[in-house]
Image (spheres, helix red, strand yellow):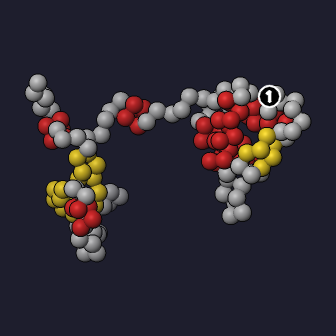
Amino acid sequence: MSSLADSHGLLCGGRQFTAAEIAVVCEVVTTCRGLSRKELANTISELLGWSRPNGSLKEAECLLLLARLEAQGLLQLPAKQQTRPAQYGITPLLVETFVDAARYHGGCYRAANWEEIGETSGRGRDDRQHRQAGQPKRVLVYRLRRDAQAQLRGERQRS
């Protein structure tokens, strides 16, 4: 399809889009400049009634439609969103998880090189009365960088 006036429309994700529907898609992208690509796809899917039999929106298919329309020069999508480290200006050093020792032993984590570093007090994150309401949980961490401990201590890397 080379222009909006093409009477054949565009087939994408099992749906034939008319030139009028493509014009609506282009108008939404132009009008809603502050939305991310994902938000645009969901907005357009909802507007056009493009959903699965279970009622969920066809977000992935709409993202494909948008990419195809952009490749044809019919619209310009917003820049892809940055990854979290770039967005927040930090790079994570490790990740943590909590294992309920009364129910699980955490073998899968240990097999994947997670390290147990201690145990929680059992209070939980929403405890405002400072009471132990739950079971203590094991705390496991996975280092994303070899020098995670040194970085957390503020030690400089040796050259």
Residue at left offset 15%, top offset 41%: 149
* Residue that label 1 marks: 2
For numbered disc 1, what is the local secondary structure? loop
Q: Would residue 153 appear left or right of 72 to someone viewing this image?
A: left
Residue at (21% x, 56% y) in the render: 113
Mark 1 residue crowding within 10 angstroms, few (<14) / some (14–19) / many (20+)? few
Asked if residue 73 lies left or right of residue 19, the reply is left
Q: Is residue 128 visible?
A: no
The quarter holding residue 6 reads: top right
Residue farthest to the right, as pictured: 7
Instruction: Let me know if residue 6 appears in the view.
Output: yes
Q: Residue furthest bottom?
A: 102
Residue 63 percent coordinates (x, y): 64, 41
Is 40 placed above or below 100 here?
Answer: above
Quadrant of the snapshot with the N terminus: top right
Give me the residue at 71% from left, 25% from top: 73
**Residue 49 drawn at (x, y percent):** 77, 51
Q: Is residue 89 above or below residue 58?
A: above
Work out which quarter of the rendered image holds the C terminus and state it: top left
> Relative to 100, is 127 above or below?
above
Q: Position of residue 36 (x, y in %)?
A: 59, 36
Amino acid at circle 1 = Ser
Q: Residue 77 appears at what percent x and percent y?
A: 64, 30
Q: Is residue 143 above or below residue 116?
A: above
